[in-house]
Image: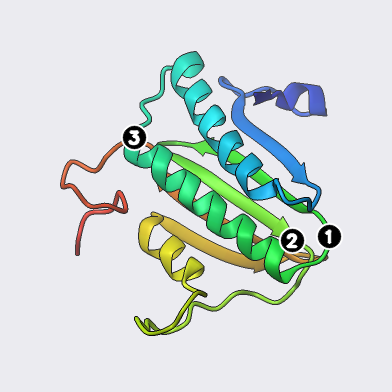
Amino acid sequence: MEADPASAGGTAPDRAAIQISVALAGDGEDIAQARHLAVGFLTRVQAEHGLPVSQRAMDVTQLVVSELVTNARKYAPGPVLLDLKITGDTVEVVVWDSDPVLPVARAADAGRVGQHGLEIVMAVAQGFEAQREPVGKRITARIALADDPGGAVSGRRPL
């Protein structure tokens, strides 16, 4: 789905933004719905816009969406908003929830059961940002659409 900036009262750029947004109501199907939405979005990006989307990007995007929506459902009451947007050669996964507390990645601990989601997201994403909003918080992860020629799983070149 595309958003048309001109219809929102702005001027249309050369190419309209490629994005989709959904409010997840909080039922037991949210996480699966979000993953399916991500795959459908990236499939349309490939088919309709001709942008390259690797299988790794599909898989990593599903993983990131799953982890971020799971955390939002687990720690914040109310709805969760999910935005997927193509920005250059990345897909931005943005999740908003009502809890203003920013997440903190915990130190790696192989003995810890659970609570590794944020660590996973930060390890596989090209970029990660968490910011407070007037209500709640917004988490953004960026994932490269094409595989890195150097073979880095995150789409980044090793340092």
Please provide percent x and percent y for residue 87: 50, 38
Q: Is residue 139 visible?
A: no
Label 1 close to label 2 by CB (< 8 Å):
yes
Using the image, determine if residue 20 lies above or below residue 97: above
Using the image, determine if residue 52 lies above or below residue 28: above
Q: Which mark is residue 97?
A: 2
Q: How is the image coloured?
A: rainbow
Query: Where is the C terminus found, in terms of image quarters?
Result: bottom left
Q: Which mark is residue 55?
A: 3
Labels in figure, total:
3
Considering only order in the chain, which callout, 3 or 2, is on the residue closer to the N terminus? 3
Using the image, determine if residue 133 lies above or below residue 23: below
In front here: 32 or 51? 32
Residue that lies at the very extreme toward the top in this rendered image: 48
Tell me the kind of residue under disc 1: Gly
Left or right: 30 with respect to 32? Answer: right
- Select label 2 or label 3 by which is in front: 3
Distance between mark 1 and mark 2 Cα atoms = 8 Å
Residue that lies at the very extreme toward the left in this rendered image: 150
Distance between mark 1 and mark 3 Cα atoms = 33 Å
Please provide percent x and percent y for residue 78: 84, 60
Tell me the kind of residue under disc 2: Asp
User: What secondary structure is marked by label 1?
Assistant: loop
Residue at 61% x, 35% y: name it. 37
Q: Which residue is mark 1?
A: 78
Residue at 48% x, 61% y: name it. 128
User: What secondary structure is marked by label 3?
Assistant: helix
The image quadrant that residue 90 belongs to is top left
